Image (cartoon, rainbow, N blue to C red):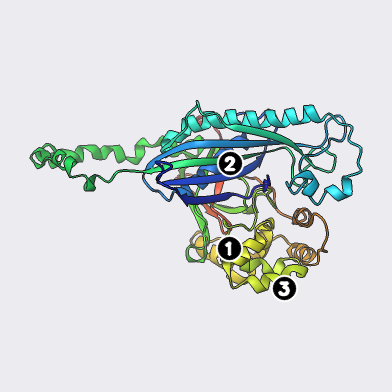
C-alpha cells in the first residue's frame, strides 16, 4: 500500500459487460490531513469533499446517467508518537516501513510508545472522516446524480506513519502522519436516449401544443427584476465558497468576476480567503480601489506537478528546479507523458510559478489591461515577493539527499508573501452602489470564501 499524499489519482476504465452492468467505472483516490475529532461541519472535511466533487465532475465529463458509489476504502494514519516513540507501519514516503528510505536510519531505535492505542486513534480518524463524508454525500450526492447507499460497508484500515518520532508539525519538512486516504469506485450507467426508443415518440402529441399560449408568457418577466434580488448585497456574504476557472493570457488571467450591491450600510468590511492555491483580487467601489496581491498558501501537501497541472506549466518551471535534476527534466521536456511521470511527486512552487509567469508571460501587463478602466495600475512588486530570486536560487542549488521534497517545501516557506487572507473596508459613497471583485487565478481553478460585516444604522443582516 503506497498512499501518495495529496496526489489525486483518477482513472476511467471500460468494464467487461459480462461481469457488470456499469458502462464505466470512475476510480477516485484522494488524501488529506485531519484532526482526530473531525466532523462534517469542519473546514478540513468540507474542503476535502469539495475536492472529491471537483474530481468527480472532471472525470464524469458531464455525461448524463446514474452514478452509484460501489466501493469506499479508507486508510487512517497517525504520527509515530504516543506516550513515546511508536514503531511505524509506514515510512514518511508512505511506503511499508521496512521498504521505506527511513527504515535504515531508524531500524535500531527503541520504540517505547503505545502502538496499539496509536493505531486505534488512526482508525478513529478514518471512522470520523467516513461519518462526515456519509452525511455530505447523502445531502450533496443527489444534486450531482450520485447515489450513495448507506447500507454499503466501507473497508477501513489504519497504521502509524514515521514522522521523525514527533507529532505532526507544520513547517517540519515532513509529510504528515495524521491523514486519511480514500479510494472510491463509482459505477456509471448511461442515460437512455429517448430518440432511439420509438415506443416513446407518441408522447409528443402535437395536438397539445396550443396549451402553450405565447400571449401569456410575458407575465413571467417580473421574476427577473433585479430589485427583487436583495441577496446580491455584499452584506449577505457569510463565508460562502466562490468557485471559478483558471485564467490565462487570453482573458488576462481572470478566474471569476463578482458583482455586488453596496446596500444601505455606511461601511462594509470584507474578508477574502483563498482556500489553498494563491489568487489575487482587485476590488472597485466608486472611487475606492483595493488590491490584495497574491495571497494563499506558499505550498500545499496536496498539490504536486502531477497530471492536474498543464504541460506548459511543467515546462515553465524547469528553470527553477534543482540543477542536479535539470538535465533529465530538459530531456523529457518534449514529451508530456515522460515529463509528467518524472515530476509527479514534486510539490508545486506556487510563488515560483507567479515569478515565472510575470517574467515570461507578462502577468503584470495582462492584469493591468484588465483593471485599466478603473484608473488603477500595479507593478511587479505588487504580485511577486521581493525575495523571489533569492528563494529560487536556493531551490536551484539544493543538494541531493534524503527528504528532498520536504526540504524544497521548507524553502518555499521563505517567500515573503502577503497575509493569507485579505481584509479591506469600503466606505459608502453617495450615488454609488456597484461593487466589482475580480479574482485573478493563473495557477489553478479559483476557489475562495467571502465574509462581510456591515456597520451603520440601516445595517443589513450578516
In the picture, the quarter occupied by the N terminus is top right
The image quarter containing residue 201 is: top left
Dot placed on the residue nearer the N-terminal end, 2 or 3? 2
Residue bearing the label numbered 1: 377
Q: Nearer the viewer, mark 2 or mark 3?
A: 2
Q: Nearer the viewer, mark 1 or mark 2?
A: 2
**How would you rate the neighbour count of disc 3 (Cα within 10 Å): few for under 14, some for 14-19, many for 20 or more?**
few
Residue bearing the label numbered 3: 327
**Spatial distance from mark 1 to mark 2, Cα to Cα?**
47 Å
**How would you rate the neighbour count of disc 2 (Cα within 10 Å): few for under 14, some for 14-19, many for 20 or more?**
some
Dot placed on the residue nearer the N-terminal end, 1 or 2? 2
Residue 322 position in % (x across, y down): 76, 66
Residue bearing the label numbered 2: 183
**Image point (45%, 41%), residue name:** 187
Answer whether residue 284 is visible to the viewer in this image.
Answer: no
* Residue 257's disc number: none
- Disc 1, SS: loop
Who is closer to the viewer here, 103 or 63?
A: 103
Amino acid at each position: 500500500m503506497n498512499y501518495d499524499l495529496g496526489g489525486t489519482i483518477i482513472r476511467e476504465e471500460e468494464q467487461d459487460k459480462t461481469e457488470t452492468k456499469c458502462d464505466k467505472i470512475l476510480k477516485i483516490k484522494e488524501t488529506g490531513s485531519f484532526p482526530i475529532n473531525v466532523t462534517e461541519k469542519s473546514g478540513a472535511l468540507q474542503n476535502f469533499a469539495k475536492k472529491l466533487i471537483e474530481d468527480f465532475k472532471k472525470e464524469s465529463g458531464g455525461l448524463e446517467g446514474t452514478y452509484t458509489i460501489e466501493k469506499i476504502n479508507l486508510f487512517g494514519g497517525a504520527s509515530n508518537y504516543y506516550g513515546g516513540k511508536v514503531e511505524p507501519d509506514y515510512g514518511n514516503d508512505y511506503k511499508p516501513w521496512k521498504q521505506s528510505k527511513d527504515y535504515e536510519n531508524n531500524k535500531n531505535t527503541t520504540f517505547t510508545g503505545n502502538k496499539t492505542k496509536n493505531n486505534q486513534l488512526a482508525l478513529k480518524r478514518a471512522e470520523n472522516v467516513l461519518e462526515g463524508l456519509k452525511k455530505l454525500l447523502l445531502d450533496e450526492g443527489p444534486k450531482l446524480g450520485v447515489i450513495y447507499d448507506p447500507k454499503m460497508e466501507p473497508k477501513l484500515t489504519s497504521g502509524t506513519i514515521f514522522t521523525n518520532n514527533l507529532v505532526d508539525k507544520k513547517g517540519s519538512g515532513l509529510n504528515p502522519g495524521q491523514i486519511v486516504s480514500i479510494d472510491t469506485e463509482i459505477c456509471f450507467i448511461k442515460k437512455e436516449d429517448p430518440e432511439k426508443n420509438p415506443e416513446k415518440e407518441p408522447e409528443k402529441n402535437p395536438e397539445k401544443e396550443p396549451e402553450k399560449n405565447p400571449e401569456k408568457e410575458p407575465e413571467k418577466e417580473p421574476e427577473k427584476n433585479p430589485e427583487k434580488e436583495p441577496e446580491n448585497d455584499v452584506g449577505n456574504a457569510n463565508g460562502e465558497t466562490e468557485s471559478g476557472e483558471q485564467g490565462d493570457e487570453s482573458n488576462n488571467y481572470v478566474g471569476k468576476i463578482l458583482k455586488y450591491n453596496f446596500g444601505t450600510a455606511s461601511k462594509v468590511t470584507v474578508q477574502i480567503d483563498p482556500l489553498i492555491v494563491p489568487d489575487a483580487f482587485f476590488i472597485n467601489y466608486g472611487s475606492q480601489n483595493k488590491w490584495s496581491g497574491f495571497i494563499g498558501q506558499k505550498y500545499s501537501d496536496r498539490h504536486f506537478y502531477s497530471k492536474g497541472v498543464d504541460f506548459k506549466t511543467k515546462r515553465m518551471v524547469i528553470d527553477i528546479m534543482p540543477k542536479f535534476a535539470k538535465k533529465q527534466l530538459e530531456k523529457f521536456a518534449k514529451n508530456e507523458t515522460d515529463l509528467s511521470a518524472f515530476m509527479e511527486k514534486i510539490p508545486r512552487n506556487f510563488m515560483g510559478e507567479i515569478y515565472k509567469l510575470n517574467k515570461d508571460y507578462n502577468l503584470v501587463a495582462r492584469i493591468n489591461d484588465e483593471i485599466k478602466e478603473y484608473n488603477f495600475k500595479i507593478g511587479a512588486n505588487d504580485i511577486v515577493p521581493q525575495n523571489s530570486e533569492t528563494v529560487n536560487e536556493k531551490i536551484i542549488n539544493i543538494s541531493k539527499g534524503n527528504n528532498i521534497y520536504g526540504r524544497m517545501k521548507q524553502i518555499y516557506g521563505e517567500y515573503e508573501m502577503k497575509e493569507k487572507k485579505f481584509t479591506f473596508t469600503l466606505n459608502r459613497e453617495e450615488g454609488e452602489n456597484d461593487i466589482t471583485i475580480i479574482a485573478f487565478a493563473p495557477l489553478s481553478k479559483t476557489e475562495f470564501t467571502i465574509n462581510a460585516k456591515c456597520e451603520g444604522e440601516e445595517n443589513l443582516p450578516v
